[in-house]
Amino acid sequence: MCDQTFVAITFGPCDSCSENRPLMNLYIKTEPINYCSLCMEIMACQDLAGGETLNSLKAETESLRKRLEEERKKLHDVELEKVAEKAEALSALNLKTRRTLKGHANKVLCMDWCKDKRRMVSSSQVPAHPVFNSSQEHAVSMPTTWVMACAYAPSGCAIACGGLDNKCSVYPLSLDQNENLAAKKKSVALHTNYLSGCTFTNSDMQILTCSGDGTSALWDVESGQLLQSFHGHSADVLTLDLAPSETGNTFVSGGSDKKANIWDLRSGQNIQSFDTHESDVNCVKYYPSGDAFASASDDATCRLFDLRADREVSIYSKDSIIFGATSVDFSLSGRLLFAGYNDYTINVWDVLKGTRVAVLFGHENRVSSLKFSPDGTAFCSASWDNTLRIWA
Amino acid sequence: MTIRTLRDHGQHYRPRMACLKKVEAFVVEMQDPKSGVKASDQKLNITSIPHVITGQDILAWIVTKMKVTTEEAQAFGTMLVAYGYIYPLQNHRKLVLVADSTLYRFQTPYFWPVQKWPAEDIDYAIYLAKRNIRKKGMLEPYEQEHYNNLHKWMNYKWDFIVMQATEQYKASKERKKPDRVVLDCQERAYWIVHRPPRRTHSGMDYGLDRLIDPNAEENIFLTQALMRSAVKSSVSLTAFVKYVTTHHTHDPLLTNPVPSNPWITDNDEFWQLNMRNVDIPTKLSVERWALSFWELISDQRGRADFKLFLKKEHSGENMAFYEAAEEMRWGAATAIPEKSQFIFNTFLKPGAPRWINIDGRTMGLTVKGLDCPHRYVLDAAQTHIFLLMKKDTFYRYLKSPVYKDMQKKALVPAPHNFTDAQLEANAKNRNPGISPIVLWQQQEAEKAAAAVAARPIDVKAMVATNKLDRK
């Protein structure tokens, strides 16, 4: 369990705007100050203060970075491969496509599982939005193309989706198959650019979204109110994932600026940042224990980042893999990492030993999304060849 | 007014096609006359086309060079064709690598999917116009459609386009026949990649553009990062290995689930046995509960068992408080004042019916925070209670008769062993299971009933309705 639990969130008057808000604890030149997230943003955007020049700031950044690296180096006493020697070797996997779901008329962009482990929702490039279980149950027609994000509510009673319309809308599901779901649609989130990812938090009442406008945001479903926004990426935010930990207070997001950031849901603060990728981070996923996360990127590698040691611990790549990875997910125990690539294949990696265990063929176009079912019995891959495949 | 869609393949800000550099290096190697793929001359109709390669040779070469399996080489080869580095001679619209004697040629570097030079509409218009002149109007239907559109949009430039097309046509007529055929093939291949007919997987289709141009700034963040403590690598990495090892038996992909994986055998007994309200859980679930407190309460059956134990110990208020606080945290914003009031009255007020035992400081902070209730006001108290349950109650639960009893009773279902015929029958009988909506409604009804039952009994009201007999 990470130390986030012990950060008692302070709530009270902000030092600068004196309003009652959740506060971030910041240190300016080792002096603690308590600002709310809005004032922090304002302060960060201000022009150079007296005595600072662009060069002096750059020099300061450099020296701070160096110090951080030195500190982290001292703690880095062993590599993952060494520790993993104790782990037993894996037996050969026998993974095959068990179901192929055809129902979309266009590229499938995203999918999500329901907690009942059987149903899933998927979204595609063109209006038509089936809720599957191996026979199509519902189809919702969306007034926008490129529905890039979709999510199933934890209760199984609603779905959320969004894309080029800059919004995230929630559709309550019903038992009646013929009901027109679009009629009960509720617009929840509104960004200033395309919506790239959305997920429900632990209940149906809140949604976390990330967008091409560089921000992520937490919304209240009932009122559509913005509860917290997260600024810090300098380019499109492409993906996010909620932490599975007991306290459930953090999430990770990855963006076009090659960075993956960890955020605190309560204060809106950027807690940790990792920028070792060489290109856009297309997908991030937490390790099942919540102490690490994996990321997939256009630079054709997947990487594992350790949150407690604050560094990257493993790179999963091969010379023969040249095309970018679009999505990753862990198996239930965290031993296997599955990644979908732009060259139509899915590679399976041994997380601890860093080697590739298997490669799965079958899709006829890019694999756009890959997710494990909640109990780990199977995983589903969505592809631009208009199908979804369930592998077990 | 010209409406142009800037299809520069995202090269503007971020080279999404950075992979192309590596591919190009590879293709150059392939073309090496000594160590590259064997090329020969082929007769096509009457002309002889130089430097033709077969699909088989390409595949074999990739396998040797990259040291990969045939299937991977196939996938990579298909990528090469999809991106236009190699083009097929006969079935020119199908951009895949076929591993037999199908003929391919290398595309000239002029036509490679280069990073800085987009495939402009005006070039396409000139190309189509040229085709039109030559074949006297024999364009494919999709090409015809494009042609009509371009004619409409670029009408003002049409004279220029037609002039260019005619010039190019005249120039090509002066070339030798084999050269002309080769150039035609190359150009046609280029346009199939950049303006694909329906149902062709062209590699140029990469999705939406990424929009923001990244620049950076981060001093405040770095100071933060320095202040924060980190853990030694050996500690955290060992923790990963430990997690993986303990969960190894629970991972359906590493250890076959009993009775069987529903996706493989189409028999959903596995799911039935693990449902929320099952009487007797499986041994695997019960073992999983012992791994950590979080695993116990994440599993709904486990949580129910734990609550049973708490009831016996008369400390059910801790769990109830935890759940109420969770509900407030993740619930609707409008319900917060009401919930916080309820929680205060039930758990925090001195003399409350389900008073929780937390230290004075936390209690003080919480009660003060309740003056201005927000969703995280109970965090400190909730953390305290959670840690209490995790460090103390959980271990007592594991040693208790409730748990030990459950361990003894737990089922170990026998693994299924279906014959092929049975598997087919299973496949026909697939059912979607109970809808999650129905399950959710059931759960809500149960919760409401439990809430009513948990309400403290109002003695005066009962006397008033003569329920208590005071004879």
Image (spheres, helix red, strand yellow):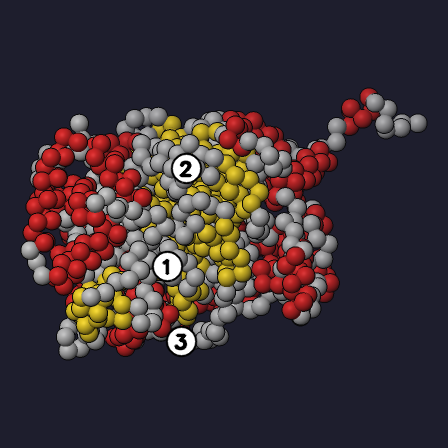
Q: Residue at x 31, y 48 (%)?
A: B197
Question: What's the distance in space between the residues labelled 3 and 1, CA to CA?
Answer: 32 Å
Q: Amino acid at mark 3?
A: Glu
Which is more toward the observer, B154 or A303?
B154
Give percent across and percent down for residue A259.
28, 50
- Name the amino acid type tagged 1: Tyr
Under tag 3, what secondary structure? Answer: loop
Residue A344 tag number: 1
Q: Is residue B33 visible?
A: yes
Look at the image and tell me whether residue A311 can be seen. Answer: no
User: According to the image, label 3 marks what residue?
Assistant: A85
Q: Which mark is residue A162?
A: 2
Q: Nearer the viewer, residue A257 or A142?
A: A142
x and y, in percent, of residue A154 in the image: 54, 43
Instruction: Please name whichever residue, B254 or B227, is drawn nearer the observer in this view of the structure.
Output: B254
Q: Chain of mark 1?
A: A
When asked about the image quadrant of residue B470, the answer is top right
> Residue B18: where, in percent of width, then height?
22, 56
Distance of label 2 from label 1 (alpha carbons): 25 Å
Q: Is residue B157 above or below residue B412?
A: above
Q: CA distance from mark 3 to mark 2?
A: 44 Å
Circle 1: is it few (<14), some (14-19), or many (20+) Cα within 10 Å?
many
Callout in the foreground (3, 2): 2
